[in-house]
Image (spheres, rainbow, N blue to C red):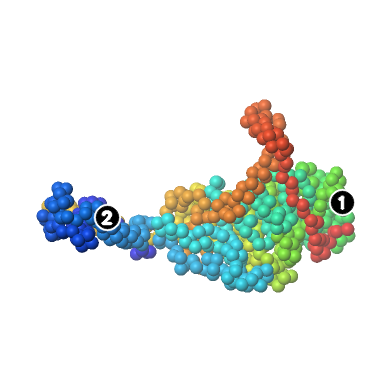
Amino acid sequence: MSGALRPRVGGFSGPTGAYILIGAAWGLICAGWLTWSAGRVAAWITGAEPGLEFGAAFAVRVVQGEFALAFGGTPLWLVAVLSVLFIAAPASGILIGVRLWRGSGTEPGDPLVSLASVDEVKALTAAKQAPNAKRLRDDLHDIDIGDLTDRDTGLALGDMMLPRGRKGPLLVSSWEDCVLAFMGPRSGKTVALASPHILDAPGAVIATSNRADIWATTHAARAQRGAVWAFDPQGLLYQEQTFWVDLLAGVESFEEAARLATHFTTRLRAGGKGGSDFWLDAAEELLCGLILAAAYKDGGTMRDVQAWLADSSDTAPVRLLRDNKYPEAARALTKAQNGAVETRDGIYQTAATAARCLQDPKLLVWITPSSQDPKLRRLLPSHLALSATSKQADTLYILAKDGAGSAAPLAAALLDQALRAAVRVSEANGGRMPIPFVVIADEAANGAPLIELPAWLSHFGGRLIQLVIILQNIAQGTPVWGEQGMATMWAAATVKLVGAGTDDTKFAGDVSTLIGDHDVPVESISRDAQGYRSVSVSLRRQRILATEDIRAMAKQTAVVFASGTRPTMVSMRPWFKGPDAEQLTEDVLEAIDAIADKASLDALFAEAPFLADRKRRKEAAAKAKGAALMPVETPATPKPVVPRFVDRRAP
């Protein structure tokens, strides 16, 4: 029998009912004897004449209300006080014992008792993770283990849930773990997982999302610890652009160009568009050559790539490749340009479709220098990784949403180059980052899809680059990584979280199977020919958490699968229940107001009166306070350090 399940069988009928009746009878007898004893003690204290001896006559007098005859000359008020004391003491002890007995057991079928015990998950507690954190992090070497906080030891997963509503220890993922979370919409993945991890990260952070909520919650707090950058080509934050990202700065080889080209074709492969594999492969090869040529052109940008895609007769990229010792790439590009007209046009059209985002000037200005605003700072993808070497806690938010005109290829390219720069920094630092580098990939399959993400999970943990990948379900990631890629991702993640909102029946069934089975006591009642009833208890084997139980999990709770431990359930810690909740709430409200003030909603006022009412209320409130409402300003960001090994194109 798994765990410590103890059945509670029988109602008032059957053996349990008989025991209750016997106990009640003896309880009345004991209460009567204690009352008689209280009378005797009261008589001894006052020196009065005691009443009747304990027995039937005494009981009859008490029931009839003839207390003077029952207790003699003893003061009745003193008898009453002593009776209450004499009865309350043993009754309290009995009640405490019953509560302890009930607390030691569980209801039949309670899944929590059959999951991991506290001893089995000690490796995930902050106390056990403290020595490992001190060993890994350079910034903790001079701090005693006893002085380390929970935040120092790892990212919080949640409080362990114990039977009968009890709370266990806080469980954390170590800085060498990579976390994979499956949580449905409105299940608390932002407030209880993504945002708290960003706030608790000790060093640099990259956070991807397709909404503004993560930025609204965390950007003000992170700005107090370092520079904050928001890569927002699609204007989800309605913030003024202050920088542009030089994606070509990291293109130092054919491999780098090929990787950048892959990000543009990912969505076509995932969506099954763009024709056969021949066209996609040829389009990637064409993009690779054009990107490599733009990287070696003086002042070359992604605008040149888009221009060359629109003109298949332009031989400038061929000359650039040949002049910079890439004759093979030059010959491949020449072949694409001089092939059959139908083939050439098909390849160029497929490549242009894959790189369609380069046709949008609003997106293009985020990855190319702007002649209209030369004050925009140039951000290198390697900046976040390099900031960790100077113990800065900079933050980069990468925002992009799916759909027509998506900036997902640009977001994926930026994330890819930033992560590979972190790998190079870790290699230069002896194999791992000096301070944990946390990457929160929320909606990883939509905002910034990276093909190599499954392979990176098993590689990054040892480098102190902690990936936290958040998906709604398996089906969301399958179009990007395929079934094999999702299986690899599940196997490589050292910590898996399955939260509320899991509506995928197959996935919920697989999770239920992984959790396992337990024995549940089942009560059977039978009656013989004479009418006598008998009660028996047998054990039935069933799933600890069935498919329907996993689907019906409460919000902000999750099942945790960690390497080397049995599954357990946790109650997650949302940011609005933390010690900084009041300040964070103010930050969120200010950020929401700033976004609302800058959004172009004037045209909707006539059709949506509530928007106009909101605007009037804000103006009236501001006038009453005697001051105009001020929008949240983007935190000042220092000019990034430009590393020589990735800044070959710097003037």
Q: Name the disc covering residue 121, or none.
A: none
State the quadrant of the N terminus. Answer: bottom left
Q: Name the disc covering residue 81, or none.
A: 2
Residue at image point 86% right, 46% down: 371
Q: Mark 2, residues whose alpha carbon is within 10 Å: few (<14), some, or many (≥20)? A: few
Looking at the rendered structure, the secondary structure element under dot 2 is: helix
Residue at image point 73% right, 52% down: 229
Residue sitting nearer the eye, 596 or 620: 620
Residue at image point 79% right, 50% down: 243
Residue sitting nearer the eye, 599 or 324: 599
Q: CA distance from mark 2 to mark 1?
A: 107 Å
116 shown above or below 528 = below
The residue under label 1 is 315
Does any portion of residue 93 appear in the rendered image? yes
Does any portion of residue 265 appear in the rendered image? no
Instruction: Name the outermost residue toward the front.
Output: 47
Instruction: Name the outermost residue toward the left.
Output: 57
Residue sitting nearer the eye, 197 or 537: 197
Q: Are marks 2 and 1 in contact (CB under 8 Å)?
A: no
Q: Quadrant of residue 642?
A: bottom right
Residue sitting nearer the eye, 18 or 580: 580
597 shown above or below 48 = above
Q: Quadrant of residue 197?
A: bottom right
Q: Position of residue 338 (x, y in %)?
A: 82, 50
Q: Position of residue 18 (x, y in %)?
A: 19, 55
Residue at image point 40% right, 61% down: 113
> Horizontal placement of 395 versus 368: left or right?
left
Q: Quadrant of residue 143?
A: bottom right
Closer to viewer: mark 2 or mark 1 = 2
